Image: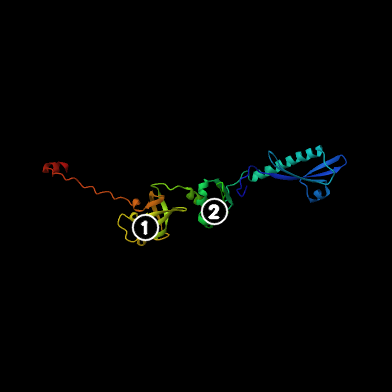
Amino acid sequence: MDAGVPISSPVAGIAMGLIKEGDDFAVLTDILGDEDHLGDMDFKVAGTENGITALQMDIKIQGIDEAIMEAALTKAKVAITHILGIMNDAISKPKELSENAPAMKTFMVNKDKIKEIIGKGGAVIKGMQEKTGATVDVSDDGTVSVFGQNQTSMQECLAIIEGILEEPELNKVYKGTVVKIVDFGAFVNILPGKDGLLHISEISAERTEDVNAVLSEGQELDVKLIGFDRGKMKLSLKALAKTEEPEVKAEETEEAPQEDKEEQE
C-alpha cells in the first residue's frame, strides 16, 4: 500500500504452535524458531478482518482433533485482528500509485484496426515501442495490452494508439510533421500512420514557386483537413491564414452649413 499498489484490503499473518501431552494441549501464538522445532505443530494463518485468505500447516504428531483446530483458529483470529489494527494505524489505504510503478492496460479494438497498430512489417508497433519504452501485445481477436515500466511510458504509448484509432475529421486543425517534400507539395503526418497531401497551391494565398523554400522535412506546422480525394487526405495551410477585414470607407456626405457646424462644436 505504501508503494501505491491497489489492494482490496490489508492482510496479516500469524504462526500458531502446539504442545501436546496425551489429551492435554496448549496452543501457542506467534511461535519462535525453538517453539517450531520442539513443538508439535507449525500452523500459519493469514487473513483480512473478514476472513482467512491462506492456511499452511506442518505437524509432527499423528493428527489433531477439532478442539485443537478450533483453539488455533480462534487465537489466530485474535492475533490477526491485533496486527491489522497496528497496520491500519500506520497506513489504512493505498497511496496514489507511484509514477515509477509499472503500469498495464488492456482493451479491445476493432479487428480492422489491428493491421494499422502493427503496421507494414511491424514498423508501427516497433516504432511506438522504441519511442516510449512500453511493450505492446496485439491478439487476433483485437485485444491490445500495453505494459510500461512506469506510468509515463504506458500513457505515451496509449496516446499513440489512440491517434492510430482516431478517424481524420473534416475541417479539423491538426499539428502535423512534414515527412516528405515533392515538386507539387508536401506530405504531412497528422496522425500515427496517417499522412495527407499539402498541395503547393494550399501552402499560401500567394503563389509558391519552390516548396523547399518555405517547408523542410521534420518541420512541425498546423494544417487543416479540407477534404478527401479517393481516400487520400487533402490538407491546407493557407486556410488557417487570418482573413484581413476589408477597410471600411467613410461615406461621403455633403458639407453641412456653417451654422450647423458651429452648433455641433
Secondary structure beneath label 2:
helix
**Residue type, label 1:** Gly
Secondary structure beneath label 1:
strand
Q: Which residue is mark 2?
A: 153
At 78% from the left and 40% from the top, the residue drawn is 72
Q: Position of residue 207 (x, y in %)?
A: 30, 57
Q: Which residue is mark 1?
A: 185
Neighbourhood count class around disc 1 (C-alpha, 10 Å): few under 14, some 14–19, many 20 upward: many
Q: Earlier in the sequence, mark 2 or mark 1?
A: 2
Count the marks. 2
> Quadrant of the rendered structure where residue 24 is?
top right
Q: Residue furthest right?
A: 22
Residue sitting nearer the eye, 59 or 227? 227
Neighbourhood count class around disc 2 (C-alpha, 10 Å): few under 14, some 14–19, many 20 upward: many
> Quadrant of the rendered structure where residue 189 is?
bottom left
**Residue type, label 2:** Ser
Residue sitting nearer the eye, 36 or 205? 205
Q: Position of residue 116 (x, y in %)?
A: 50, 51
At 79% from the left and 51% from the top, the residue drawn is 33
| Left or right relative to 63: residue 2 | left
At 16% from the left and 42% from the top, the residue drawn is 264
Residue sitting nearer the eye, 142 or 107? 142
| Left or right relative to 24: residue 203 | left
